[in-house]
Image (cartoon, coloured by chain):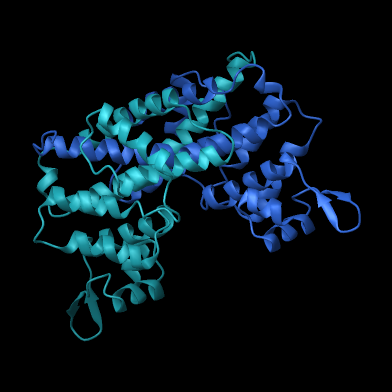
Chain colours: A cyan, B blue
Amino acid sequence: MSELSERSGTPVPTIKYYQREGMLPPGEPVGTTRTRYDGTHVARLRLIRALVDVAGLSLDQVRGVLAVIDDETTDRTAAIASAHRLLSPPPNEPPSEEARRRVTRLMDGRSWLGAREEAHALSLAAAIDRLERSGQPLPDSALEEYADAATEIAEVDLAALGGELRDAPDATTYVVLGTLLVDPVLVALRRMAQEDLARRSRGEADS
Amino acid sequence: MSELSERSGTPVPTIKYYQREGMLPPGEPVGTTRTRYDGTHVARLRLIRALVDVAGLSLDQVRGVLAVIDDETTDRTAAIASAHRLLSPPPNEPPSEEARRRVTRLMDGRSWLGAREEAHALSLAAAIDRLERSGQPLPDSALEEYADAATEIAEVDLAALGGELRDAPDATTYVVLGTLLVDPVLVALRRMAQEDLARRSRGEADS
């Protein structure tokens, strides 16, 4: 277990806690004092850590995502979609009618497949409301341009998933983890590009 | 103060705490029992809430951002850049040499103005390391495509800042708040576009 702890970067007491909670399958006993853990244990721990540390999910929410991943009766693509949906916990307060209408209009305009009134669509409506309340309403033109960029990003995301991978047993873990861990990459790149543009508009030249 | 609490969505005890900590300027006394607060108090409270709730900054980090905003000796663009930089707290562990080299190469390739070894660049290197450790290394081609999309996003961000605004006294607040509050918009749009593409690749048609 100390080796598992090292390979996954998770303290031993935390690993024991996840096992007690049924989030991490037990290892295979080898003799009386040793237990064998394999790559699936390491992958599972990394997934839990990313869900907690990067996505900021509560342990209950993590349990929901793991249950979907472990449910072998659903097909892979459906499992990916459900796990994904659990990453957008419902907003604290219901978004306004107006914001929800804007999101529906955006999705209809792009013929986007996907539920109009749940998960990501609700998160988006809530984020639009928050901008509105902060005194910085997001115009439709900016929303459309952000949606264009998001589509390009999603195309890169999905290209990383070759055809073979899509049916691999750990495809759901792969997609969920990839989605979460790429978020900070995109946040950092946006800030870097902003800084570059801001400095240029201020008249700084390459040095 | 109860009115300020209502307009900013912040509980009264929290407002009092921010005042004691010097994060929120006092209101103007009107008579002996009333105090007048204005739009700058509401804006300040919204900024603090966004820094805490959306960006997940600690109160110490929030204090740093506010100090930069309040420092009238720096010019606006420099203030925006510094406040921005404080939004990327240094990663918990220093990123690997290899990841830092990749970030430098990316920035050099695009002639991006901005420090190579601090703030956002370090956050990006740390995010690249995390993907590597999770067993899902990010190829250079994907990194470049994400950087293209991030540039488009930053252009939309900066277009929202007209020339007049750039020198307005609350320009820094505006930029910092806008940057933070748009992050969840982009996260939701990415998930929505992913879901659309995944469903299409699975053969689902418009309904």
Task: Determine whether B4 is above or below A10 in the image.
Answer: above
Q: Residue at left 68%, top 25%?
A: B77
Q: Is residue B117 left or right of residue B24?
A: left
Q: Is residue A122 left or right of residue A160?
A: right
Q: Is A2 situated above or below A204?
A: below
Figure quadrant of the C terminus of chain A? top right
A75 sits left or right of B139 in the view: left
The answer to whether any part of residue A16 appears in the image is: yes
Q: For this rendering, which residue is in front, A127 or A186?
A: A127
Counting from the top left corner in percent of width and height, residue A161 is at 19, 39
Dividing the picture into quarters, in which one does residue B118 lie?
top right
Picture coordinates of residue A97, whole percent (x, y)? 40, 43
At horizontal 66% and vertical 22% (from top left) the residue drawn is B166
Outermost residue toward the bottom? A32
Residue B92 percent location from the top left of the image: 52, 53
When asked about the image quadrant of residue B96, the answer is: top left
Asked if residue B122 shows in the view, the reply is no
- Position of residue B29 relative to residue B146, above or below, is below
Across and down, in percent, residue A96 comes to 43, 44
Q: Nearer the viewer, residue A165 or A133?
A: A133
Locate residue B153: give its quadrant: top left
Image quarter of the N terminus of chain A: bottom left
Q: Is residue B70 above or below residue A199?
A: below
Name, please, the residue furthest toward the right.
B31
Q: What residue do we see at 41% from left, 69% from top?
A: A11
